[in-house]
Image (spheres, helix red, strand yellow):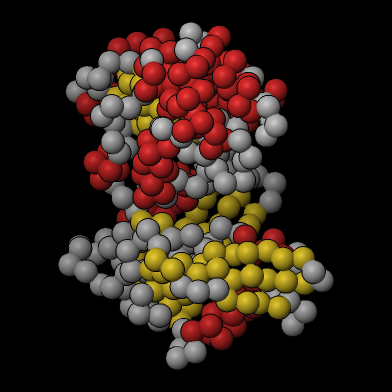
Amino acid sequence: MGIMILMVPGVILWARPTARTALSREALREKVVQLLRERYAIADKVQVTAGPLESSQDPAFYECLITYDNGQKKSSQPVSISKDGRYLAVSPLFYLGSDTNADLTRSIRTYFKLGPEWSLSVGALRPSPVPNFDEIVVTAEKGGQKQDGEFYITKDKRFAALGTVFIVRTSREIERMINTRNQPCSGPANAPVTIVEYADLECPTCARLQPFLENDLLPRYQNKIRLVYKEFPLPMHAWSRKAAIASQCAYELDPSAFVRYRSSIFAHQSEINVTNVRDQLLQLGENAGLNRLKLAACMDSEASLSRVEADLREGNELQVTSTPTCFINGKMVVGIQPPAEFYKVIDAALRHAH
């Protein structure tokens, strides 16, 4: 197996038993399917079914097998879900004994079927944004090729999570976590539906979504929706951080030019690279009606960096892992979905708002 197996997005969630009400097994199975569809943008044509809930090593959890069927082939994976429905894992829970690192690497080798030709080295524990968990990086190496996998260890070091940890939140909880004050936006502040988009200006998928949001959704719903723009530059993109800073500079200098500038960056994405990014951003800003000298001063001093960092912290707390990710009155929509999917979520939010 290739080393990329370590990057398969396992999800494991764990917490001490709480006073939250335990859900019925059927409700838990429905919650698992709903969250997986939402988090991984699984198309409606793919059938997702949850098998019977079985006992887990942790008495606060159940385990079950999820099956995916796209009409041509089937695949499956084990998941764990807490009995109160608050935490979900696309992985079993792995018990750790007194030697945390040895037990962790043993679990990784077993779960991902890594033979002795793979060498595994474990990094130091560090705080994670998820309650009850610390993060840890394990590096796998074979033949000079290295790949890092990020995993989670419970605070008491009893269990390992071989993937990303998700917290299951309600739409209302998510809405409360998002700051919409003094943020770049389109549409009226009192609109019954708020769409918050976390985007990376170097992301091609974000560039494809932008015209739909601006030229379809906003005109279609007029004063019924507000679109709030958040910066979420991804670390693998070379110039997205600079673009995010420039974008927030534009908002600080002239809010009325923000959307025009942002749309222009997306439209000229293929022309921008690490070498010319500053010149391109300044020229696009000038074309959008911004003062070139003021934009340059703001970009060079990174005066708007605190706004970008605030968006990143917020997105990380919401466990945004890819762009674009939208929240429609708190309901997550990942990536580009068919227009009908956006309409369905917005229409449901409008009905609920009345």
Q: Position of residue 65 (x, y in %)?
A: 51, 64
Q: Is residue 325 left or right of residue 58?
A: right
In-front residue for pair 154/29: 154
Q: Is residue 260 left or right of residue 174?
A: right
**Residue occupying the point 30% across, 12% down:** 223
Q: Position of residue 289 (x, y in %)?
A: 48, 8
Seen in the picture, residue 272 relative to 95 is either above or below; the reply is above
Quarter holding the N terminus is bottom right
In-front residue for pair 119/163: 119
Seen in the picture, residue 81 relative to 350 is either above or below; the reply is below
In-front residue for pair 230/303: 303
Seen in the picture, residue 48 relative to 131 is either above or below; the reply is above
Quarter holding the C terminus is top left
Q: Position of residue 225 (x, y in %)?
A: 32, 19
Determine if residue 200 is in view.
yes
**Residue occupying the point 47% across, 12% down:** 291
Q: Position of residue 145 (x, y in %)?
A: 77, 65
**Residue occupying the point 50% across, 74% down:** 124
In-front residue for pair 100/306: 306
Seen in the picture, residue 101 relative to 269 is either above or below; the reply is below
Q: Is residue 239 left or right of residue 143?
A: left
**Residue occupying the point 58% across, 52% down:** 68
